[in-house]
Amino acid sequence: MRGIGSRGDTRTRVRAASALATAMVMARTTGAFYVMGGVLGLIITAVAPGDEGNRPLVGTAALVALLLGISLLIWGPRMPHSVHHVYVGMATVLVTIAVHWFPNTVGAISLAAFYVFVACDAAIFFAWRWLGVHLAFAIACCLWVVPSRGLPWWSGLIPAGITFGIGIVVGILTRMASDADIDVLTGLLNRRGFDRALSNAIAHAARTGQGLALVLVDLDRFQKINDHLGHRAGDAVLQRVGDTWSKLLAPDQRLARYGGDAFALLLPGTTEQAAILLTEQLRAAVTTGCSAGVTSWQPGESGSLLVSRADVGLYRAKQAGRNRTVLESSRQLPLAVELREAIDRGTLDVQYQPIVSLSDGATRAVGVEALLRWSSHAQPDVTTEGLIRVAEEYDLISDLDELVLRRACADAARLQETFAQLDLTLNVNVSGLELAETEYADRVSGILADTGWPADQLVLEVTESELAAESETAIANLHTLRERGVRIAIDDFGTGYSSLSRLATLPSDILKVDQSFVAAIRSDSPAPPLLGVIAALSKSLDLQVIAEGVETEYQAAVLTELGFALAQGYHYSDSHPVSELISDLNERHGLVGAGVAEHEVNTNGWIPLDNPLDGGPGGAPS
């Protein structure tokens, strides 16, 4: 599928050479030509009469051709593309030797027909410029060697002309047939061509034991480009993306336009992690957002199974919020296996970090956020984000989310029983993949019913990108949950890509300002202007705001001055198991933070987080 050269534009290479120019097809075809020529040469040398020329030399040339053909059939699939030029050039030399030294003139002229083998081989597998080089060399040899047998100078014109004509015709017909494997718009392989390449790559991987990775990439929201800017603009985007990615690929890596705005990438000799890294480089090289699914081939698997698994990864990337890469591996990492066992045994730990009220200056606890904590033996340094990513990639996220939510609701109910006047809010994170599940809202309701935790005291936190995934199922689940009393918080607000107009229409009640904004509050510089903007925005949209990552008294004071009523962070408390949290809150009567001793302590219980569904000051129904 590629022409000559290690780098360059894939479109140019594909159009310049035949789609048949794969290592396997080249080796078998050229090898067959050599074997046929060698066998026929040996036979005719043995039976032809005459004592002209040099019969042993001709026989040797035929034997060399036979051995070269056998070597191609055995080792040819592992040879680089450039080696085939040497084989075709040597074929021309061997034919010329045989014609010049054959025992009689009639046989010599008949052997000149072997130049057609050279023309056919070069026409099928080489780019036009290299086909011209091989044809010119063969024709020059033919025009010299035939008259060298004592014939008129024009005697070589017929075999030379036939060689030229057949070479050109075969070249044209081959490229016409190859166009069935080429996408006209981008010049890349189309689905048919890619499936052919995938089949050849799997056969090669099965023989050699080398790895093979497959990536499916889809441009995000491409339909909007066609709708708003026209199909010509969309075509230009596809061409630009194809050209940009082609320049970043190695010679043996095959890129195809798999259909519509979907691209497929075949990566021989590549591991899953290397494929993910390359995919991230490709995504970063274009301005158009794109989602990708990555997988790898296992012995015995078919090409259709490999594509299906990559397509599942692509679907999961879309459902998780788009503009990301998801690995759909056929092999589970030790971390995934260990996580599966931990979920089954229920050995994962859920801890809780208080959410405090800043409005009265007493930093009174009004809620807690459930945080997953787990120490892996297989990968001790794995972060919570990395753990969630593994759970999503290995289809463990549903069980993990359910375990955390069920445990958190049960622990919150225990807190409720411990404090008579407790009215706290429980915040729990939810994966975008879970939101896209049709039964998610019913599953949450079932957990609330089983644990006895009130729906109006549960807050589910999702990120901006997950809310902006434009999944009808996810949005429908959020609406259903809010109708049942559950509140929705947009986590890490300010780091996603939701527009303000879309934010106003999302089913949400609370904004959690990303900790990067809070970290920018320093005593030696003014408060970041965006914090004031967010505070004003929340008031105009009747949304509560929680500032995350508060670590200093100065940050807490600035947030209070800006009008933020709620906050959480290490300045107030780290995360704790529920038993430690109960003990701490009991001693401090619901107050948290380093400055608790300076405040008057009473036993009036916790200040409840206002329920926007009741039309209170914290928010209004939407």
Image (cartoon, rainbow, N blue to C red):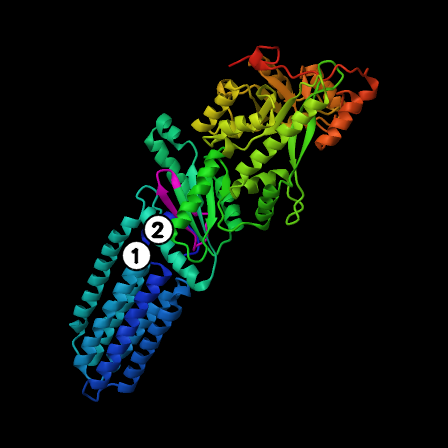
Classify mark 1: helix, strand or loop: helix
Q: Mark 1 against mark 2, which lies toward the viewer?
A: 2
Nearest the eye: 203 or 287: 203
How far, Cα to Cα, is label 1 from label 2?
Answer: 25 Å
Nearest the eye: 382 or 486: 486
- On the image, the x and y values in percent for residue 31 come to 32, 69
- On the image, the x and y values in percent for residue 301 come to 41, 54
The residue lying furthest to the right in this view is 597
Report whether residue 228 is seen: yes
Image position of 264 with respect to 156: above or below? above
Q: Quadrant of the N terminus?
A: bottom left
In the rendered image, residue 254 lying in the magenta stretch gets the answer yes
Q: Which residue is mark 2?
A: 195
Image position of 598 with respect to 385: above or below? above
3 left or right, relative to 340 = left
Label number found at residue 128: 1
235 left or right, relative to 141 = right
Which of the two discs, 1 and 2, labels the residue nearer the N terminus?
Answer: 1
- Residues shaded magenta: 246-262
Q: Residues within 10 Å of mark 2 (few under 14, many from 20)?
A: many
| Amino acid type at mark 1 | Trp
Nearest the eye: 489 or 12: 489
